[in-house]
Amino acid sequence: MAAFPGAEDFVVGLIGMGDMGKMYARRLSSAGWRIMACDREDKYNELVAEFANHKNIQILRNGHLVSRASNYIIYSVEAAAIGRVVAEYGPSTRLGAIVGGQTSCKDPEIKAFEEHLPSDVDIVSCHSLHGPNVDPRGQPLVLIKHRASDESFAKVEAVLRCLGSKHVYLSAAEHDRITADTQAVTHAAFLSMGKAWHANQQFPWEGRRYVGGIENVKINLMLRIYAQKWHVYAGLAILNPEAHKQISQFARSTTELFYLMLEGRRDELRERVYAAKEKVFGREDCPKWGERPLLPVGVLDRFSLNADANATSNAPPMPNNHLSLLAMVDCWSALGIVPYDHMICSTPLFRLWLGVAEHLFRTPGLLDESLRVGIEDTSFRRDDLQFTIAASGWAECVALRQFDTWRERFEVTQKFFEPRFKGAIEMGQAMIKAVLESDKEGGSG
């Protein structure tokens, strides 16, 4: 355990024991920190039983008890609920304590802290930019020194150092802008894919239409997202003002590119896509990417969910216009976003999706083939139509700030794909591990 004066008596409180809260509790307690934790009172007995063998973790009945007993309190709750939860437990915060949150959107979190915490409390927030099932070692961990002494900030760093993450120092506003840049469009793309396949009642891995590395990423990461809780993505999309602009533009880019394909406007489509390529990826003689690609050649081809793996592994990929990737790059271009500027805050999912886009736009002939298919080949028209409808549906949901509608849209598709979640999560973990190991071997792209 990292030491500072009084560290042996320092107590870390966790309010909210969802997947991320539990991950933090286990990691921090294993490093020797004393943990006081709670969730809703109806989960008390269940949590007591689950953590009965963890000597450094004590489960309490509510956030009042955690707040009174802890030197450093982390709220690990849904972004949509942070205001209500802090309003309830914030006034019980121990004199001189440090308080932070783990939400994906900091604007409502900081406002809740400023409104409901005592003035003698320091505020240091954090955000692990990965899911609860990803090894935190080497992953970005944002630290936000909002209202705190250097001593308090140093204590937070000492506590969280056991995660092995890369510390990134941002303000709350910078955090929300960068997380929107690196996550909003990525999530919208995969959410829309799932809705499209669901609308057409198809499991894409069961046929020969979606074969090869790019398709493996689409399928595995779509399933990975739908295997999570709905609020993980709703909070970032609906509560982050920066995300609103991006999801709206993604829907607009998808619709306009699809119209160009439908109407056979070949020259306009090519001109628009190549202009986006130059803005996002740079010119060939002056690229914005690193010396090596984000994704090693062939690394993704082996991660197929298709039951007939031997047959599909040797089958040539079916030509696809990759509308989702074209729309993502077009969206970034329209908003002036260069994704490589935010690699220090990138999630594994974002690195995979950017790596696939990079592959499409950098591989000689592949982008032109994609545009040709978009104009001439109707094989994916039904999927593209439903994808376009889905992207607009998510954008409208976000614009109207409809959490209930988001949840309904998400959960009905979640139920459709649920039988394959276990395999998809395992496959997604292996895919991310392969990419991260490649990064370590060759350096960041």
Image (cartoon, rainbow, N blue to C red):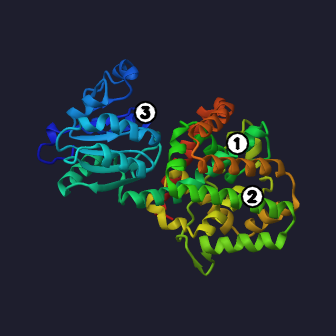
Which residue is depicted at the point 76% across and 49% down?
314
- Pointer 3 local density, CA inside 10 Å: few below 14, some 14–19, many at least 20: some
Find disc 2 in the rendering and name its residue. 255
- Pointer 1 local density, CA inside 10 Å: few below 14, some 14–19, many at least 20: many
The correct choice, above or below, for 279 with respect to 328 in the image is below
Find disc 3 in the rendering and name its residue. 18
The correct choice, above or below, for 133 with respect to 181 in the image is above
Which residue is depicted at the point 85% across and 51% down?
379
Which residue is depicted at the point 20% across and 51% down?
152
- Label 1 sits on a secondary structure element that is helix
Q: Are marks 2 and 3 in contact (CB under 8 Å)?
A: no
Relative side of 367 to 264, left or right: left
Relative side of 45 to 362, left or right: left
Find disc 1 in the rendering and name its residue. 195
Q: How far apart are labels 1 and 3 at the CA level?
A: 26 Å
Q: First in sequence: mark 2 or mark 1?
A: 1
Q: How far apart are labels 2 and 1 at the CA level?
A: 16 Å
In the image, residue 78 lies at what x, y percent?
Answer: 45, 39
Q: Quadrant of the N terminus?
A: top left
Q: Nearer the viewer, residue 434 or 174?
A: 174
**Residue 155, visible in the rendered structure:** yes
* Quarter of the figure with residue 320: bottom right
- Pointer 2 local density, CA inside 10 Å: few below 14, some 14–19, many at least 20: many
For badge 1, the amino acid type reads Lys
